[in-house]
Amino acid sequence: NNLQNPPLALLLRSSPKTTFHRRTTPQQSAQMSSSQADWEYPEHKVYERVPGYDEIDLTDRKALLAAREQKLRDDWVRAMEVRVIREQLSKCYKTEGVNHYQNCRHLADLYLQAIRQNNVVGYRGREWAARNSRDARDARDA
């Protein structure tokens, strides 16, 4: 079952990489190869989890901003996961051709599941968006 539904990390690793070539002298290439050997993958910044909107006092400005930033980061990560899956699905469609219905089915299912689960609402929520669209519609009609 894991072979049919690869984890997102495998999809990220299998994405195509773009490389650029430039003309260098032998001395420059020797310097670059030694500096590339010293290169290490940068460490990602890990943010501390803070209480959500339901658990904080809404008059506490610092807690409110921290909860908002966390919500935006979480939404951004979910949106990027959907984007990665969509790009992999598109790549699969192009490479598989007429057989994409069978060979890309696992990615299509994963993409549909991600769209349903990772619906980005925004930090203000659905109620705020519905209320403001209704107010704008009422003002336009008046």
Image: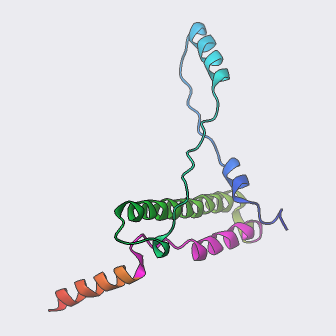
Q: Position of residue 3 (x, y in %)?
A: 83, 62
Q: Position of residue 84 (x, y in %)?
A: 60, 58
Residue occupying image coordinates x 45% and y 71%: 56
Q: Position of residue 57 (x, y in %)?
A: 41, 72
Left/right of residue 71 with respect to residue 16 in the rendered view: left
Q: How many marks?
A: 0
Left/right of residue 5 with respect to residue 78 in the rendered view: right
Residue 49 vs residue 79, the one in the foreground = 49
Q: Quadrant of residue 16?
A: top right
Residue 119 vs residue 3, the one in the foreground = 119
103 is within the stretch colored magenta? yes
Q: Looking at the image, is 129 positioned above or below residue 27?
A: below
Q: Looking at the image, is 10 positioned above or below residue 57?
A: above
Instruction: Tell me the chief SS of the magenta region.
Output: helix
Quadrant containing the C terminus in the rendered view? bottom left
Quadrant containing the N terminus in the rendered view? bottom right
Residue that protrudes farthest toward the top in the picture: 27
Residue occupying image coordinates x 68% and y 59%: 92
Residue 46 vs residue 4, the one in the foreground = 46
Q: Position of residue 64 (x, y in %)?
A: 39, 65
Residue occupying image coordinates x 65% and y 58%: 88
Q: Looking at the image, is 18 positioned above or below residue 89?
A: above
Residue that protrudes farthest toward the left in the picture: 142
Residue 59 vs residue 92, the one in the foreground = 59
Residue occupying image coordinates x 65% and y 74%: 113
What stretch of residues is rendered in magenta?
Answer: 102-126
